[in-house]
């Protein structure tokens, strides 16, 4: 986990944000439909079963985009890590495609931002 955090810090400090890192499947999460589970592990340090469904993240108060906030829309959720520019953020995106977990640049347009803390 520490190596992953160092890698994310290096990515965020780099002037090139085009990189897309595939990271390990979140431990304890199901093989399919695991974006909410992965986000809960990233935010709280453990799986929160109640938050496995993306829609359940709407229970948190609305927030402005910032590191540690969560972007949610119907059927998907991811954690904001670092702003690239404007609406583009480096995000921790569990189940972002092909059942993989990515840390990559992604637009937050169309997402509701919530504060899980």
Image (tube, helix red, strand yellow):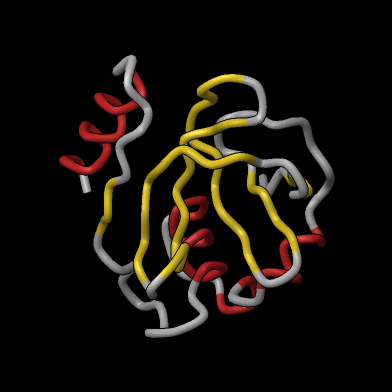
Q: Is residue 41 above or below residue 83?
A: below
Where, quadrant-wise, is the C terminus in this rendering? top right
As drawn, 75 above or below 93: below
Residue in view at x 40 percent, y 43 percent: 104
State the residue lying farthest toward the left.
3
Left or right: residue 52 versus residue 57 is: left
Q: Is residue 33 left or right of residue 101?
A: right
User: Which x, y percent locates residue 85?
Assistant: 57, 19
Q: Residue at x 58, y 31 (%)?
A: 88
Q: Residue at x 51, y 51 (%)?
A: 43
Q: Is 24 left, or right, of 28 in this rendering? A: left
User: In the rendering, at what x and y percent does residue 116 appear?
Assistant: 67, 49
Q: Position of residue 4 (x, y in %)?
A: 22, 43
Relative depth, front residue between 70 and 59: 70
Location of residue 11 (image quadrant): top left
How many tags in the picture? 0
Q: Taking 48 as reference, is 59 left or right?
A: right
Extreme residue in the bottom direction: 31
Q: Which residue is at the far front?
A: 18
Q: Is residue 61 above or below residue 54?
A: above
Residue at (48, 42) in percent of width and height = 91
Residue 56's place in the image compared with 18, above or below, is below
């Amino acid at each position: 986990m520490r190596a992953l955090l160092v890698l994310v810090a290096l990515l965020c400090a780099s002037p090139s944000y085009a990189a897309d890192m595939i990271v390990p499947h979140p431990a304890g999460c199901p093989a399919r439909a695991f974006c909410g589970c992965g986000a809960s592990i990233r935010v709280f340090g453990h799986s929160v079963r109640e938050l496995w469904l993306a829609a359940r993240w709407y229970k948190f108060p609305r927030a402005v985009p910032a590191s540690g906030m969560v972007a949610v829309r119907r059927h998907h959720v991811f954690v904001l890590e670092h702003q690239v520019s404007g609406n583009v953020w480096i995000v921790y995106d569990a189940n972002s495609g092909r059942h993989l977990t990515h840390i990559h640049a992604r637009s937050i347009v169309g997402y509701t931002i919530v504060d899980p803390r």
